């Protein structure tokens, strides 16, 4: 089947760069560049309920009985009822579509068109491999829903090779797949001249961290090490994107100590976009030592901008790039001492330019164009009823 028209269901506006790390925006835009008609359907929950009643009334109560639960408003019967109605109406509206793409494992409605689920991981994966616990009773129904959707989908795509393999073991081989590459969520429009970038980086004193609150442990670890490094490298600076100064209890997190916190930077904002990419272009190294998951998407984007990297050796990264890397260092034992040594080794590296070049080389083909072509090839064998 030659796909000419698709309906894309995303938890957020796929015309908004802020939706799921820029993925729906860049994916749908690339589909359109390939000549497809894209019907966009936003199936995100009601933000007013989510950010008021749920956040301030329901979450505190649930946390008393189920500490550390991952139950969200999106999983409730009320929200799912409304969302499924919206999906059914959209399926009736876009009945000429050749393919339905759900950018989530949470929904799948019966239709005459083939259905593809495209996301990163399921809640069951998070519980089993990240949190290492059994589900709470309030979480079990949603796990069954995701499992049922995966069993009924024509194709299930994960962005990560190790997660795709684990999902095959969890749900049966079925049609779960990884398309052979991840993607760089790059929207930079400025000059990109290798020699100029390397020249800036060689003389740079900027350590760059990108991550939100779920990477706070890694950020705190980096701050501790950075303050020790300042005695050796007094001009060193630490720039943190995604977290604000108020997120840290450490009173030493301040510009006076060379630590700059920007909070979340919106790529859709001209000013914040410029600041974000200016940091990527000028940084000496990109660092996220958070164990288990070191911010894959921001890491590969940093690599594209010739940044050597220092990250934990989590499986999604090592499955893609190997246990040994020639573009930075792994923080193997999750210790401050190991991170300290990694940064010192990089700062003193005589072949720093080679690290930069290797980093870019390893991800330069992680383009949305290449990924989308692989996606269209993967779904070409599907047929409408």
Image (cartoon, rainbow, N blue to C red):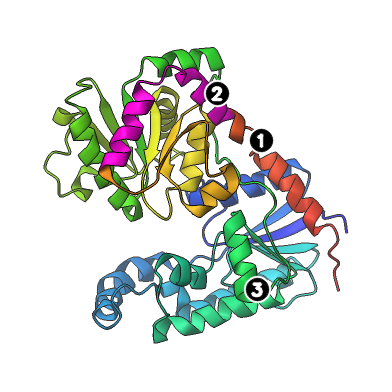
Q: CA distance from mark 2 to mark 3?
A: 40 Å
- Residue 206, compared with residue 45, is above or below; it is above
Determine whether the residue tagged by mark 3 lies in a helix, strand or loop: helix
Q: Mark 1: few, some, or many residues within 10 Å (few <14, many ≥20)? A: some
Q: Secondary structure at mark 2?
A: helix
Q: Quadrant of the N terminus?
A: bottom right
Span colored in magenta: 337-360
Q: What main secondary structure does the magenta stretch of the protein show?
A: helix
Which one is in front, 240 or 326? 326
Label 2 or label 1, whichever comes before in sequence order: 2
Where does label 1 land, which residue?
365
> What residue is disc 3 on?
150
Q: Residue 344: within the magenta?
A: yes
Q: Nearer the viewer, residue 348 or 222?
A: 348
Sort mark 3 into few (<14), some (14-19) or many (20+) by Cα contacts within 10 Å. Answer: many
Residue 380 part of the magenta-drawn span: no
Residue for point 36% across, 45% down: 289
Residue 50's x, y, as percent?
A: 37, 69
On the rendered image, what quadrant is the C terminus found in? bottom right
């Amino acid at each position: 089947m030659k796909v000419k028209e698709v309906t894309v269901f995303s938890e957020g506006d796929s015309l908004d760069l802020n939706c799921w790390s820029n993925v729906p925006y860049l994916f749908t835009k690339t589909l359109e560049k390939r000549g497809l008609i894209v019907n966009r359907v936003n199936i995100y929950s009601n933000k007013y309920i989510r950010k008021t009643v749920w956040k301030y009334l329901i979450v505190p109560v649930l946390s008393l009985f189920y500490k550390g639960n991952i139950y969200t408003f999106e999983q409730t019967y009320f929200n799912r009822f409304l969302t499924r109605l919206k999906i059914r109406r959209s399926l009736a509206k876009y009945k000429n579509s050749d393919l339905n793409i759900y950018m989530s494992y949470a929904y799948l409605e019966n239709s005459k068109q083939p259905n593809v689920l495209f996301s990163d991981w399921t809640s069951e994966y998070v519980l089993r491999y990240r949190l290492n616990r059994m589900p709470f009773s309030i979480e079990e129904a949603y796990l069954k829903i995701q499992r049922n959707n995966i069993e009924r989908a024509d194709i299930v795509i994960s962005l990560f090779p190790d997660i795709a393999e684990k999902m095959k073991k969890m749900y049966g081989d079925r049609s779960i797949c990884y398309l052979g590459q991840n993607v760089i969520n790059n929207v930079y429009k400025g000059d990109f001249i290798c020699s100029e970038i390397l020249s800036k980086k060689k003389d740079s004193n900027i350590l760059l961290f990108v991550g939100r609150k779920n990477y706070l442990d890694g950020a705190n670890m980096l701050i501790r090490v950075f303050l020790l490094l300042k005695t050796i490298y007094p001009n060193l600076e630490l720039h943190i994107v995604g977290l604000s100064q108020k997120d840290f209890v450490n009173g030493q997190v301040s510009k006076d100590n060379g630590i700059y916190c920007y909070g979340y930077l919106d790529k859709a904002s001209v000013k914040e976009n410029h600041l974000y990419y200016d940091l990527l272009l000028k940084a000496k190294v990109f660092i996220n030592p958070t164990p288990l998951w070191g911010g894959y998407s921001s890491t590969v984007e940093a690599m594209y901008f010739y940044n050597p990297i220092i990250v934990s050796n989590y499986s999604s990264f090592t499955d893609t790039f190997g246990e040994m890397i020639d573009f930075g260092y792994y923080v193997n034992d999750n210790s401050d001492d190991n991170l300290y040594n990694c940064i010192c080794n990089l700062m003193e590296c005589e072949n720093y330019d080679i690290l930069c070049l290797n980093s870019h080389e390893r991800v330069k083909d992680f383009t949305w164009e290449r990924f989308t072509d692989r996606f269209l090839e993967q779904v070409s064998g599907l047929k409408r009823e």
